[in-house]
Structure formats: structure tokens, C-alpha cells
Amino acid sequence: MRSLYLDLDIAYAGDMGDLMRFYLSNVDLMLWTQHQDVSGNDIYELDYITADELAEPILIKDVLHFGYLLHSHGLENVRVIGNRFQSPEIQASQAS
């Protein structure tokens, strides 16, 4: 089982439509970026850079859809908590 370690506060406020794009594949390095489009809308992008090449982007509709895609790619050690995506290991380290 692969694990994804993620501690991102995305200020989730309903359906984000096409604003979030994730590259899901074998994870070697994870880069989180936030920028604005020409209309001033925030765009959140999480790039998974792999040993091969970047995976195709997958559009995320909401938090539950994101969680489903993580599990469907074998990333089972991830939990969605409110507005945050956290792994159990991160939760344990924050609690101590």
C-alpha cells in the first residue's frame, strides 16, 4: 500500500469545479502551488512529479471526489478531515 502524506488547508467552500487539478501517480515529489487566473480566481494545483513523467491532470469536483480518487489509486492511508487532507501519521505527530 502506498501512502500519501498531505497536510493542506484549502479553505474548502463548496464545489470548486475545475479549480483543483491533481496529478495522481506514483509519488516521488509533491509540489503544492496556488495562483490566480486572468479573472483573479484562485487556482490550486498539486503536482506529483514522478520518476517517469507527469501523469495527466485529473479534475477534482469536491473533497469527497478527491478522497475517492486517492483511494482508487491505492493511496489508502489518507483521511479527509473537514477542510484538511491529512494522513494518520501527521495527525499523530500534531497531537504529541
Image: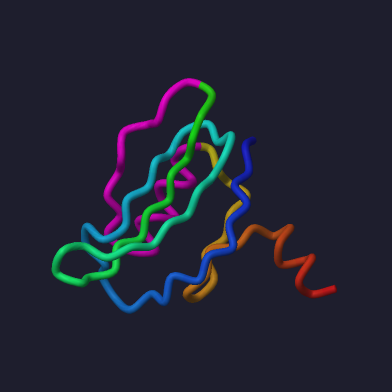
Left or right of 51? Residue 88 is right
- The front one of 72 and 9 is 9
Q: Residue 81's quadrant in the figure?
A: bottom right
Quick check: is 63 in the magenta stretch?
Answer: yes
- Magenta part of the protein: which range? 52-73
Left or right of 82? Residue 12 is left
- The front one of 48 and 84 is 48
**Residue projecting furthest to the right:** 96
**Image location of residue 7, percent across then percent down:** 59, 63
User: In which quadrant is the N terminus drawn?
Assistant: top right
Count of numbered badges drawn on the protein: 0
User: In which quadrant is the C terminus drawn?
Assistant: bottom right
Q: Residue 17's quadrant in the figure?
A: bottom left
Q: Residue at x 37, y 47 (%)?
A: 22
**Residue projecting furthest to the left:** 39
Q: Residue 79's quadrant in the figure?
A: bottom right
Left or right of 42? Residue 31 is right
Q: Residue at x 40, y 30 (%)?
A: 54
| Colour scheme | rainbow
**Image location of residue 51, percent across then percent down:** 54, 24
**Image location of residue 77, percent across then percent down:** 63, 49
Q: Residue at x 74, y 58 (%)?
A: 89
Q: Height in image: 71 above or below 39?
A: above
Quick check: is 41 in the magenta stretch?
Answer: no
Q: Height in image: 94 above or below 7?
A: below
